Protein backbone atom coordinates (compact mmCIF):
# COMPACT_ATOMS: atom_id res chain seq x y z
CA UNK A 1 0.00 0.00 0.00
CA UNK A 2 1.35 3.41 -1.02
CA UNK A 3 0.26 6.66 0.67
CA UNK A 4 1.53 10.21 0.76
CA UNK A 5 1.53 10.57 4.54
CA UNK A 6 1.39 8.32 7.57
CA UNK A 7 -0.05 10.13 10.60
CA UNK A 8 0.54 8.57 14.01
CA UNK A 9 -2.31 9.41 16.38
CA UNK A 10 -5.95 10.36 15.86
CA UNK A 11 -6.51 12.83 18.63
CA UNK A 12 -7.43 16.42 17.86
CA UNK A 13 -4.11 17.10 16.09
CA UNK A 14 -4.19 13.92 14.01
CA UNK A 15 -7.83 14.45 13.10
CA UNK A 16 -7.36 18.01 11.89
CA UNK A 17 -4.12 17.25 10.04
CA UNK A 18 -5.56 14.22 8.25
CA UNK A 19 -8.69 16.19 7.31
CA UNK A 20 -6.64 19.07 5.88
CA UNK A 21 -4.36 16.79 3.88
CA UNK A 22 -7.24 14.73 2.53
CA UNK A 23 -9.09 17.93 1.51
CA UNK A 24 -5.98 18.79 -0.50
CA UNK A 25 -6.22 15.46 -2.35
CA UNK A 26 -3.46 13.63 -0.50
CA UNK A 27 -3.64 9.95 0.40
CA UNK A 28 -3.31 9.54 4.15
CA UNK A 29 -3.12 6.63 6.54
CA UNK A 30 -3.73 7.30 10.23
CA UNK A 31 -2.31 4.76 12.69
CA UNK A 32 -4.09 4.89 16.03
CA UNK A 33 -4.88 2.48 18.81
CA UNK A 34 -8.00 3.92 20.39
CA UNK A 35 -7.50 4.96 24.01
CA UNK A 36 -10.63 5.94 25.94
CA UNK A 37 -8.78 8.41 28.16
CA UNK A 38 -6.58 10.22 25.67
CA UNK A 39 -6.21 13.92 26.41
CA UNK A 40 -8.40 14.92 23.44
CA UNK A 41 -11.25 12.66 24.51
CA UNK A 42 -11.39 13.88 28.11
CA UNK A 43 -10.69 17.59 27.50
CA UNK A 44 -13.42 20.12 28.23
CA UNK A 45 -13.48 21.57 24.71
CA UNK A 46 -13.41 25.18 25.92
CA UNK A 47 -11.61 27.93 24.01
CA UNK A 48 -11.16 30.75 26.52
CA UNK A 49 -9.60 34.03 25.33
CA UNK A 50 -8.58 35.03 28.87
CA UNK A 51 -6.26 32.97 31.03
CA UNK A 52 -4.82 32.83 34.54
CA UNK A 53 -5.39 34.75 37.73
CA UNK A 54 -4.05 37.90 36.08
CA UNK A 55 -6.78 37.70 33.44
CA UNK A 56 -4.50 38.15 30.43
CA UNK A 57 -5.17 37.32 26.80
CA UNK A 58 -4.28 33.86 25.58
CA UNK A 59 -1.40 33.88 23.10
CA UNK A 60 -2.52 35.01 19.61
CA UNK A 61 -6.20 34.65 20.53
CA UNK A 62 -7.20 37.47 18.17
CA UNK A 63 -6.25 35.16 15.30
CA UNK A 64 -7.05 31.80 16.85
CA UNK A 65 -10.59 32.47 18.11
CA UNK A 66 -12.20 33.46 14.78
CA UNK A 67 -10.12 30.85 12.92
CA UNK A 68 -11.30 28.13 15.31
CA UNK A 69 -14.94 29.06 14.84
CA UNK A 70 -14.54 28.85 11.08
CA UNK A 71 -12.52 25.60 11.15
CA UNK A 72 -14.80 23.68 13.53
CA UNK A 73 -17.86 24.88 11.61
CA UNK A 74 -16.37 23.68 8.32
CA UNK A 75 -15.24 20.35 9.80
CA UNK A 76 -18.70 19.90 11.33
CA UNK A 77 -20.39 20.56 8.00
CA UNK A 78 -18.14 17.94 6.42
CA UNK A 79 -19.15 15.25 8.92
CA UNK A 80 -22.77 16.45 9.31
CA UNK A 81 -22.38 17.28 12.98
CA UNK A 82 -22.57 20.58 14.86
CA UNK A 83 -19.19 20.81 16.60
CA UNK A 84 -18.90 24.35 17.98
CA UNK A 85 -21.04 26.92 19.73
CA UNK A 86 -20.39 30.38 21.06
CA UNK A 87 -20.87 30.82 24.79
CA UNK A 88 -19.56 32.80 27.74
CA UNK A 89 -17.90 31.99 31.04
CA UNK A 90 -19.58 33.30 34.17
CA UNK A 91 -16.83 33.79 36.73
CA UNK A 92 -18.21 33.81 40.28
CA UNK A 93 -15.51 35.89 41.94
CA UNK A 94 -14.67 34.20 45.26
CA UNK A 95 -12.94 36.99 47.19
CA UNK A 96 -12.96 40.82 47.38
CA UNK A 97 -9.43 40.79 45.97
CA UNK A 98 -10.49 38.79 42.90
CA UNK A 99 -13.52 41.01 42.46
CA UNK A 100 -11.32 44.11 42.51
CA UNK A 101 -8.80 42.55 40.12
CA UNK A 102 -11.54 41.65 37.65
CA UNK A 103 -13.04 45.15 37.73
CA UNK A 104 -9.61 46.72 37.24
CA UNK A 105 -9.11 44.62 34.11
CA UNK A 106 -12.46 45.60 32.58
CA UNK A 107 -11.13 48.78 30.98
CA UNK A 108 -7.99 47.02 29.79
CA UNK A 109 -9.81 44.09 28.15
CA UNK A 110 -13.15 45.47 26.94
CA UNK A 111 -13.20 42.99 24.04
CA UNK A 112 -13.50 39.99 26.36
CA UNK A 113 -14.37 41.07 29.93
CA UNK A 114 -17.62 42.53 31.26
CA UNK A 115 -20.02 42.50 34.18
CA UNK A 116 -23.23 40.74 33.11
CA UNK A 117 -26.50 42.64 33.39
CA UNK A 118 -28.16 39.70 35.10
CA UNK A 119 -25.49 38.91 37.68
CA UNK A 120 -28.13 38.53 40.42
CA UNK A 121 -30.19 36.06 38.40
CA UNK A 122 -28.11 33.08 39.48
CA UNK A 123 -29.08 33.03 43.15
CA UNK A 124 -31.38 30.05 42.59
CA UNK A 125 -28.48 28.03 41.20
CA UNK A 126 -25.37 29.09 43.12
CA UNK A 127 -24.24 30.52 46.42
CA UNK A 128 -21.98 33.52 45.79
CA UNK A 129 -21.24 36.40 48.19
CA UNK A 130 -19.52 38.64 45.63
CA UNK A 131 -20.13 39.75 42.05
CA UNK A 132 -20.03 37.81 38.80
CA UNK A 133 -17.69 38.56 35.92
CA UNK A 134 -18.21 37.42 32.36
CA UNK A 135 -15.69 36.33 29.72
CA UNK A 136 -17.26 36.65 26.30
CA UNK A 137 -16.99 35.42 23.58
CA UNK A 138 -15.74 31.90 24.24
CA UNK A 139 -16.19 28.76 22.18
CA UNK A 140 -17.28 25.29 23.27
CA UNK A 141 -16.22 22.40 21.03
CA UNK A 142 -17.73 18.91 20.95
CA UNK A 143 -14.42 17.04 20.80
CA UNK A 144 -15.93 13.61 21.43
CA UNK A 145 -18.20 13.81 18.39
CA UNK A 146 -15.40 15.18 16.22
CA UNK A 147 -12.98 12.39 17.04
CA UNK A 148 -15.58 9.59 17.05
CA UNK A 149 -17.28 10.53 13.78
CA UNK A 150 -14.01 11.31 11.97
CA UNK A 151 -12.62 7.96 13.07
CA UNK A 152 -15.62 6.27 11.47
CA UNK A 153 -15.09 8.29 8.27
CA UNK A 154 -11.41 7.30 8.16
CA UNK A 155 -12.31 3.63 8.56
CA UNK A 156 -14.87 3.88 5.76
CA UNK A 157 -12.16 5.28 3.46
CA UNK A 158 -9.57 2.66 4.49
CA UNK A 159 -7.52 5.54 5.89
CA UNK A 160 -7.18 4.24 9.46
CA UNK A 161 -5.10 1.39 10.81
CA UNK A 162 -6.53 0.72 14.27
CA UNK A 163 -3.41 -0.69 15.88
CA UNK A 164 -0.66 0.35 18.22
CA UNK A 165 2.25 2.05 16.51
CA UNK A 166 5.41 0.08 17.20
CA UNK A 167 8.77 1.69 16.50
CA UNK A 168 10.32 -1.65 15.56
CA UNK A 169 7.89 -1.88 12.62
CA UNK A 170 8.83 1.53 11.21
CA UNK A 171 11.71 1.71 8.73
CA UNK A 172 13.07 5.14 7.83
CA UNK A 173 15.11 5.55 4.64
CA UNK A 174 16.32 8.72 2.94
CA UNK A 175 13.34 9.03 0.64
CA UNK A 176 10.51 7.00 2.21
CA UNK A 177 8.92 5.52 5.32
CA UNK A 178 7.58 1.99 5.63
CA UNK A 179 5.37 0.47 8.30
CA UNK A 180 4.10 -3.11 8.08
CA UNK A 181 4.15 -3.06 4.28
CA UNK A 182 2.75 0.48 3.97
CA UNK A 183 5.06 2.94 2.21
CA UNK A 184 4.78 6.72 2.57
CA UNK A 185 6.71 9.81 1.56
CA UNK A 186 6.55 11.21 5.09
CA UNK A 187 5.40 10.31 8.58
CA UNK A 188 3.96 12.92 10.96
CA UNK A 189 3.75 12.20 14.67
CA UNK A 190 0.59 13.50 16.34
CA UNK A 191 1.06 11.13 19.24
CA UNK A 192 0.21 13.38 22.20
CA UNK A 193 1.81 12.43 25.49
CA UNK A 194 3.50 9.44 23.83
CA UNK A 195 5.67 11.94 21.98
CA UNK A 196 7.86 12.24 25.05
CA UNK A 197 9.31 8.84 24.10
CA UNK A 198 9.62 9.59 20.38
CA UNK A 199 13.28 8.83 19.48
CA UNK A 200 13.40 11.62 16.89
CA UNK A 201 11.87 14.33 19.07
CA UNK A 202 12.50 13.21 22.66
CA UNK A 203 14.98 16.08 23.22
CA UNK A 204 12.23 18.69 22.85
CA UNK A 205 11.29 20.45 26.13
CA UNK A 206 8.23 18.39 26.94
CA UNK A 207 6.62 18.97 30.31
CA UNK A 208 3.62 16.69 30.44
CA UNK A 209 1.06 17.09 33.18
CA UNK A 210 -1.86 15.09 34.48
CA UNK A 211 -5.41 16.37 34.49
CA UNK A 212 -8.51 15.02 36.20
CA UNK A 213 -12.18 15.82 35.71
CA UNK A 214 -15.50 14.73 37.15
CA UNK A 215 -18.53 14.05 34.96
CA UNK A 216 -21.75 14.87 36.81
CA UNK A 217 -25.44 15.01 36.04
CA UNK A 218 -26.97 18.42 36.90
CA UNK A 219 -30.33 18.32 35.09
CA UNK A 220 -31.67 21.77 35.95
CA UNK A 221 -28.61 23.92 35.38
CA UNK A 222 -28.94 26.16 32.26
CA UNK A 223 -26.54 24.97 29.58
CA UNK A 224 -25.92 28.27 27.76
CA UNK A 225 -22.94 29.21 29.96
CA UNK A 226 -19.77 27.80 31.46
CA UNK A 227 -19.58 28.42 35.22
CA UNK A 228 -16.42 29.03 37.20
CA UNK A 229 -15.53 29.43 40.85
CA UNK A 230 -12.27 27.60 41.53
CA UNK A 231 -13.66 24.58 39.69
CA UNK A 232 -15.19 24.94 36.22
CA UNK A 233 -18.55 23.50 35.09
CA UNK A 234 -18.74 22.91 31.34
CA UNK A 235 -21.78 21.56 29.43
CA UNK A 236 -20.96 18.01 28.31
CA UNK A 237 -23.37 15.50 26.76
CA UNK A 238 -27.14 15.46 27.39
CA UNK A 239 -27.60 16.71 30.97
CA UNK A 240 -24.00 15.94 31.93
CA UNK A 241 -21.34 18.43 32.98
CA UNK A 242 -17.55 18.26 32.80
CA UNK A 243 -16.08 19.54 36.10
CA UNK A 244 -12.39 20.21 36.47
CA UNK A 245 -9.58 20.40 36.22
CA UNK A 246 -6.25 19.73 37.88
CA UNK A 247 -2.72 20.39 36.64
CA UNK A 248 -0.44 17.87 38.34
CA UNK A 249 3.25 17.97 37.45
CA UNK A 250 4.41 15.18 39.77
CA UNK A 251 2.46 11.95 39.49
CA UNK A 252 3.17 8.23 39.56
CA UNK A 253 0.22 7.05 37.45
CA UNK A 254 -2.70 8.28 35.39
CA UNK A 255 -5.44 6.95 37.64
CA UNK A 256 -8.18 9.26 38.98
CA UNK A 257 -7.57 10.19 42.61
CA UNK A 258 -9.93 10.21 45.56
CA UNK A 259 -8.35 13.50 46.68
CA UNK A 260 -9.56 15.32 43.58
CA UNK A 261 -13.03 13.81 43.80
CA UNK A 262 -13.39 14.89 47.43
CA UNK A 263 -12.24 18.41 46.52
CA UNK A 264 -14.87 18.70 43.77
CA UNK A 265 -17.62 17.35 46.02
CA UNK A 266 -16.74 19.82 48.78
CA UNK A 267 -16.74 22.76 46.39
CA UNK A 268 -19.97 21.70 44.69
CA UNK A 269 -21.71 21.32 48.05
CA UNK A 270 -20.66 24.83 49.03
CA UNK A 271 -21.33 26.55 45.70
CA UNK A 272 -24.07 24.70 43.79
CA UNK A 273 -27.67 24.85 45.05
CA UNK A 274 -29.00 22.19 42.69
CA UNK A 275 -28.99 18.41 43.19
CA UNK A 276 -26.28 16.56 41.26
CA UNK A 277 -24.98 13.04 40.74
CA UNK A 278 -21.40 12.06 39.91
CA UNK A 279 -21.42 9.55 37.06
CA UNK A 280 -17.74 9.33 36.08
CA UNK A 281 -14.23 10.36 37.10
CA UNK A 282 -11.59 10.62 34.37
CA UNK A 283 -7.90 11.43 34.09
CA UNK A 284 -5.37 11.84 31.29
CA UNK A 285 -1.90 13.11 30.48
CA UNK A 286 -1.51 16.33 28.51
CA UNK A 287 1.36 16.75 26.01
CA UNK A 288 2.43 20.15 27.35
CA UNK A 289 5.85 21.74 27.03
CA UNK A 290 7.97 24.27 28.87
CA UNK A 291 7.60 26.99 26.23
CA UNK A 292 3.80 26.70 26.02
CA UNK A 293 4.11 26.88 22.24
CA UNK A 294 3.40 23.91 19.96
CA UNK A 295 5.88 21.74 18.06
CA UNK A 296 5.05 21.93 14.35
CA UNK A 297 7.11 20.94 11.31
CA UNK A 298 9.69 18.52 9.95
CA UNK A 299 12.82 17.22 11.65
CA UNK A 300 15.85 19.35 10.64
CA UNK A 301 17.91 16.26 9.72
CA UNK A 302 15.34 13.54 8.97
CA UNK A 303 13.17 15.67 6.70
CA UNK A 304 10.65 12.93 5.96
CA UNK A 305 9.72 12.79 9.67
CA UNK A 306 7.46 15.45 11.13
CA UNK A 307 5.77 16.41 14.36
CA UNK A 308 2.48 18.07 15.31
CA UNK A 309 2.33 18.03 19.09
CA UNK A 310 2.91 19.94 22.33
CA UNK A 311 -0.44 21.74 22.40
CA UNK A 312 -0.89 21.51 26.16
CA UNK A 313 -4.13 22.96 27.53
CA UNK A 314 -4.71 25.16 24.47
CA UNK A 315 -5.09 22.37 21.93
CA UNK A 316 -8.67 23.28 20.98
CA UNK A 317 -7.56 26.65 19.64
CA UNK A 318 -4.07 25.72 18.42
CA UNK A 319 -4.77 22.45 16.57
CA UNK A 320 -7.06 23.78 13.78
CA UNK A 321 -4.82 26.74 12.94
CA UNK A 322 -1.51 24.88 12.97
CA UNK A 323 -2.91 21.87 11.14
CA UNK A 324 -3.59 24.25 8.26
CA UNK A 325 -0.14 25.86 8.62
CA UNK A 326 1.57 22.46 8.58
CA UNK A 327 -0.48 21.32 5.60
CA UNK A 328 0.47 24.44 3.62
CA UNK A 329 4.10 23.96 4.60
CA UNK A 330 4.09 20.33 3.45
CA UNK A 331 2.35 21.08 0.15
CA UNK A 332 3.56 24.56 -0.76
CA UNK A 333 6.56 25.23 1.53
CA UNK A 334 4.85 28.29 3.04
CA UNK A 335 6.52 29.15 6.37
CA UNK A 336 5.24 28.08 9.77
CA UNK A 337 5.03 30.71 12.50
CA UNK A 338 8.55 30.85 13.95
CA UNK A 339 7.20 30.60 17.51
CA UNK A 340 5.65 27.22 16.65
CA UNK A 341 8.06 25.86 14.05
CA UNK A 342 10.02 22.93 15.48
CA UNK A 343 13.08 24.24 13.63
CA UNK A 344 13.58 26.62 16.54
CA UNK A 345 15.09 23.54 18.21
CA UNK A 346 17.35 22.71 15.27
CA UNK A 347 20.52 22.65 17.35
CA UNK A 348 18.98 20.32 19.93
CA UNK A 349 17.45 17.98 17.37
CA UNK A 350 20.66 17.80 15.34
CA UNK A 351 22.59 16.11 18.15
Image (cartoon, rainbow, N blue to C red):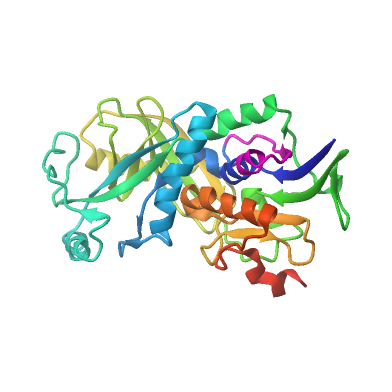
Which image quarter holds the C terminus? bottom right
How far from the left and from the top, in percent, is residue 15? 60, 40
How far from the left and from the top, in percent, is residue 196? 67, 57
Taking depth in this image into account, of 151 and 209 the one nearest to the observer is 151
Give the residue at x 42% y 43%.
69
Q: In this view, does 92 lie to the left or right of 289?
A: left
Quadrant in the picture for residue 349: bottom right
Give the residue at x 19% y 64%.
107
Which image quarter holds the N terminus? top right
Count numbered badges in the picture: 0
Q: Is residue 276 left or right of residue 183?
A: left
Is residue 255 at least partly visible in the picture?
no
Q: Does the magenta stretch include residue 31?
A: yes
Taking depth in this image into account, of 283 and 68 the one nearest to the observer is 68
Give the residue at x 76% y 42%.
165
Up/down of 54 relative to 279, above or below: below
Quadrant in the picture for residue 326: bottom right
Up/down of 335 relative to 170, above or below: below
Give the residue at x 55% y 67%.
339
Q: Residue furthest bottom?
A: 347
Look at the image and give the residue range highlighted in magenta. Answer: 19-36
Taking depth in this image into account, of 300 and 213 the one nearest to the observer is 300
Q: In this view, does 266 lie to the left or right of 59?
A: left
How far from the left and from the top, in percent, is residue 176? 85, 51
How far from the left and from the top, in percent, is residue 2? 84, 39
Is residue 135 at least partly visible in the picture?
yes
Up/down of 22 relative to 59, above or below: above
Q: Does the magenta stretch include residue 244?
A: no
Amino acid sequence: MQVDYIIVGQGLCGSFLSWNLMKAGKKVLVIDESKPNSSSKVASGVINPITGRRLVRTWDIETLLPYSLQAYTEFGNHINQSLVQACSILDFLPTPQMELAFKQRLNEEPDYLRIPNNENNWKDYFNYPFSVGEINPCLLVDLNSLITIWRKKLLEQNALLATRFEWKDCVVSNDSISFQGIVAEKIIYCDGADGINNPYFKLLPYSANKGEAIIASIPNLPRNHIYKQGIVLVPWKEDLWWIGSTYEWNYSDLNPTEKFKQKVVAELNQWLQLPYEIVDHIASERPANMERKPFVGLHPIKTNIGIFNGMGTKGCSLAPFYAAELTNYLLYQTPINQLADVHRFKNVLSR
